[in-house]
Image (cartoon, helix red, strand yellow):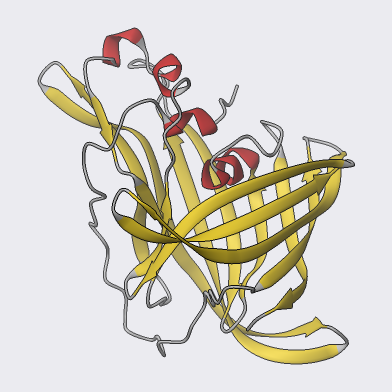
Amino acid sequence: MKKSLIIILGSVFLLISCKESITPPPDDSKNSDFFPNSNGNYYQYNVSVYDSTTLIQSGVRKSYFAGDTVLLLTQYQSKVDTFEINNVNTINQSYFRKSPTGIFNYVGIDTTGFSGLVPDSLTSGYSFSSEYRLIYQPLSLNQIWPVYKISVDYLIYQFDFFTVDAQVILKDTLTLNYRNSSVTKEVYKIKYEAMLLTGLNSPPIRFEAFCWIAEGIGFIRWEGDSEIFNFFAGRNIYLENSNVVEELISYKSQ
């Protein structure tokens, strides 16, 4: 059975910085902005959540950017997400920074969860970063980058206990219809794959999700395993072992 990824966020403070063993792609980018981040930008998504057979949750997610803050001596921008799912409202605040090389999200410190997931034989030492790279910039077809990882020391060995990697798998031009108007945009499709090791003698559990991101707009669609959505959100928003679809239905960009 899949385990929730939110407990990956852990109980240990930052020990290492994110390593960037990135596969260089062909340079087909135009340095376009695929993540407009002006304060006040607003997005609304229809949300559908499925188990193996049926729709089990539905509603909307509303997102907006709301000012700056400093965490671990680093300046981040705040994003507020309001989830209205099955008539239950949940507000989630997260933090990101935008640099010439990517969009980096702050990973909060949870004091309860991580140690419960690590097998007793692996608790001698583990390390992880204080942020994950959600988007690599500039985007380009076939670009591959490490999003996040947790390493574990066991005897004389070190191995990756939890990893998330991303790859741009499609570049396209789409006509999008919002507010009774049509706009043609360059769009990339990105695949995220997470691998979770639950024991020394067990095969890793794999999760995957896909997003579509449009030039000048941002994310227009997400689809995949709820565990990846919950990891990115930093909390258990969606039910475990479910498939989530988020589709942009309106937006306002400054």
Viewer can see residue 34: yes
Corner quadrant of residue 130 = top left
Where is 176 relative to 200, above or below? Answer: below
Corner quadrant of residue 138 = bottom left
User: Which residue is rendered at x = 28% and y = 16% of the image?
Assistant: 122
Corner quadrant of residue 96 = bottom left
Viewer can see residue 5: no
Q: Position of residue 160 (x, y in %)?
A: 29, 34
Q: How many marks?
A: 0
User: Which residue is rendered at x = 85% and y = 50% of the image?
Assistant: 59
Where is 15 relative to 81, above or below? Answer: above
The N terminus lies in which quarter of the figure? top right
Front residue of 24/86: it is 86
Front residue of 154/61: it is 61
User: Which residue is rendered at x = 48% and y = 55% of the image?
Assistant: 95
Q: Position of residue 9 (x, y in %)?
A: 44, 34
Front residue of 201/179: it is 179
Where is 121 relative to 43, above or below? Answer: above
Q: Position of residue 182 (x, y in %)?
A: 79, 91
In the displayed structure image, the side of residue 11 where residue 232 appears, left or right: right
In the displayed structure image, the side of residue 217 where residue 62 appears, left or right: right
User: Which residue is rendered at x = 57% and y = 59% of the image?
Assistant: 79
In the displayed structure image, the side of residue 49 where residue 18 appears, left or right: left
Q: Position of residue 135 (x, y in %)?
A: 44, 64
Where is 30 relative to 125, above or below? Answer: below
**Name of the residue lying farthest toward the left:** 156
The C terminus lies in which quarter of the figure? bottom right
